[in-house]
């Protein structure tokens, strides 16, 4: 009980001392506040940036994906061989799914330009003829409505899914689902609107073109505009296992060459493998940024601790008479030590709490500028608060020991 009473008295006298020297206490707190604010805000900021970058990468839709594109002949001999083949056709996708063990899904795609009209508004846009598998292969989300069904693909249904920007340009904020538009003079019913692609961190030109265009069922586009045997622009081939990328490429090349009667009028672009390399580079950059910014935040907290140490030493010089008088009246070295250590710890705790609150305020102020917002990590908050208290105790040890070792007569004489 005596020890508890002594601790309570140390805390009480520390609070009185802090309150009686408001300006000095405030200046001492600033370093701790800035340090804990930096750790809290930097942790959340880096997590927000990391989340936005990987979200943008997901929107690219290249995870586990290869492109099969048309390759023109390089000489007259190849031109003669290529004449045996019809080029890339939708049925090539069926061949890959039937013969390949690594292939999980295929999205045949035909790209052209059409004139889209709604009332007096008209725009020439990129139009993509795709199957229902396209949204899964390329990770495309629908903001409202739905994507094509197999029945609509096979029945040449006049249905369309608008890109996010095209919807805004034609309809503004009005719901487009169920409305009719003109595509090169033919009426199409809007059944869905695509979600926004990319963000301020990952903003590809293809995103813009795709969002400003529209999707039509592949067979509908071929029947109405391109001809029933029009070759595809590309085929997106996907595997769920990134370790099977090499196998998928070998399977695709062998199966398609057989289906095209020996004509290698195509080439396989291993986009997923390139994306894996890019991801590794970005992971390295983000890790370095975590180290750099974490070090800056840590140094700022250390500097704040040095400021606390300086102020505590100055405080001892100003309170020599008080220390000498208390020792003359029976105060022990331990009581003096605890008083100054408690004062240092309480100052750092108050500074840590204020820094955390300021960090949370800064996070809330800028969170709207990030696609997924900035997360509040209570672990990081606890660590920054704990570090501030630990540093307060460590930096308070020397001043507390110095004050406790002063001799009463020497302290009183020096004060006078």
Image: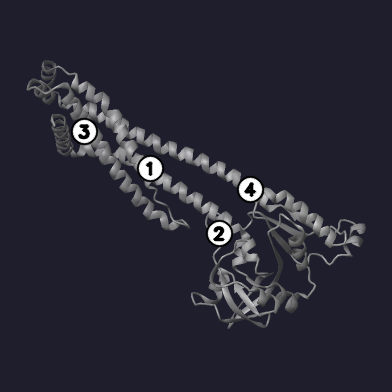
Give the mark nearer the N terminus: 2 vs 3: 2
Residue marked by disc 4: 276
Q: Is the Cβ of the residue at disc 2 closer than 8 Å to that at disc 4?
A: no
Give whichever of 32, 374 is nearer the camera. Answer: 374
Query: Which of labels 2 and 4 is toward the front?
Result: 4
Residue marked by disc 3: 343
Give the mark nearer the N terminus: 3 vs 4: 4
Determine which quarter of the picture holds residue 56: bottom right
Q: Secondary structure at mark 1?
A: helix
Give the mark nearer the N terminus: 2 vs 4: 2
Determine which quarter of the picture holds residue 303: top left
Q: Secondary structure at mark 4?
A: helix
> Disc 4 versus disc 1: distance between alpha carbons?
32 Å
Is any part of residue 71 visible from this angle?
no
| Mark 2, other Cα within 10 Å: few <14 / some 14–19 / many ≥20 | many
Residue 356 vs residue 412: left or right?
right
> Disc 1 versus disc 2: distance between alpha carbons?
29 Å
Q: Secondary structure at mark 3?
A: helix
Give the mark nearer the N terminus: 1 vs 3: 1
- Residue at position x 40%, y 54% in the image: 366
In this view, 114 is above or below 237:
below
In this view, 303 is above or below 119:
above
> Disc 1 versus disc 3: distance between alpha carbons?
24 Å
Give the image location of residue 68, x and y in percent.
75, 59
Q: Which numbered dot is residue 38?
A: 1
Give the mark nearer the N terminus: 1 vs 2: 1
Give the image location of residue 134, x and y in percent.
65, 65
- Residue at position x 27%, y 39% in the image: 349
Q: How many marks?
A: 4
Give the image location of residue 383, x and y in percent.
36, 40
Residue marked by disc 2: 198
């Amino acid at each position: 009980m005596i020890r508890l009473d002594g601790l309570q008295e140390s805390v009480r006298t520390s609070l009185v001392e802090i309150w009686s020297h408001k300006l000095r206490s405030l200046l001492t707190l600033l370093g701790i506040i800035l340090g804990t604010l930096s750790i809290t805000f930097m942790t959340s900021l880096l997590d927000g940036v990391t989340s936005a970058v990987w979200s943008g990468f997901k929107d690219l839709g290249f995870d586990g994906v290869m492109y099969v594109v048309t390759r023109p002949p390089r000489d007259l001999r190849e031109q003669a061989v290529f004449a045996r083949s019809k080029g890339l056709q939708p049925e090539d996708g069926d061949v890959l799914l039937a013969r390949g063990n690594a292939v999980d899904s295929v999205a045949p795609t035909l790209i052209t330009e059409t004139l889209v009209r709604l009332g007096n508004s008209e725009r020439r846009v990129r139009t993509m003829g795709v199957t229902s598998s396209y949204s899964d292969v390329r990770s495309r989300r629908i903001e409202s409505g739905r994507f094509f069904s197999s029945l609509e693909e096979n029945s040449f249904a006049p249905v369309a899914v608008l890109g996010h920007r095209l919807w805004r340009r034609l309809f503004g904020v009005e719901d487009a689902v169920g409305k009719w538009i003109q595509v090169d003079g033919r009426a199409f019913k809007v059944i869905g609107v695509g979600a926004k692609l990319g963000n301020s961190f990952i903003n590809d030109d293809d995103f813009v073109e795709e969002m400003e265009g529209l999707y039509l069922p592949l067979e509908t586009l071929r029947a109405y505009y391109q001809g029933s045997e029009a070759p595809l622009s590309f085929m997106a081939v996907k595997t769920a296992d990134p370790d099977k990328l090499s196998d998928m490429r070998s399977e695709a090349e062998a199966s398609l060459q057989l289906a095209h009667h020996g004509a290698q009028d195509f080439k396989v672009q291993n986009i997923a493998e390139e994306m894996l390399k890019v991801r590794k580079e970005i992971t390295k950059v983000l890790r370095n940024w975590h180290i750099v910014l974490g070090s800056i935040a840590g140094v700022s907290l250390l500097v704040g601790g040095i400021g606390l140490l300086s102020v505590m030493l100055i405080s001892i010089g100003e309170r020599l008479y008080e220390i000498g008088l208390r020792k003359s009246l029976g105060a022990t070295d331990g009581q003096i030590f605890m008083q100054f250590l408690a004062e240092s710890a309480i100052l750092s705790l108050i500074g840590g709490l204020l820094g955390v609150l300021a960090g949370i305020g800064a996070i809330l102020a800028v969170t709207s500028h990030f696609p997924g917002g900035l997360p509040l990590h209570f672990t990081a908050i606890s660590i920054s608060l704990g570090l501030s208290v630990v540093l307060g105790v460590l930096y308070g040890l020397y001043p507390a020991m110095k004050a406790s070792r002063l001799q009463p007569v020497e302290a009183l004489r020096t004060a006078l």
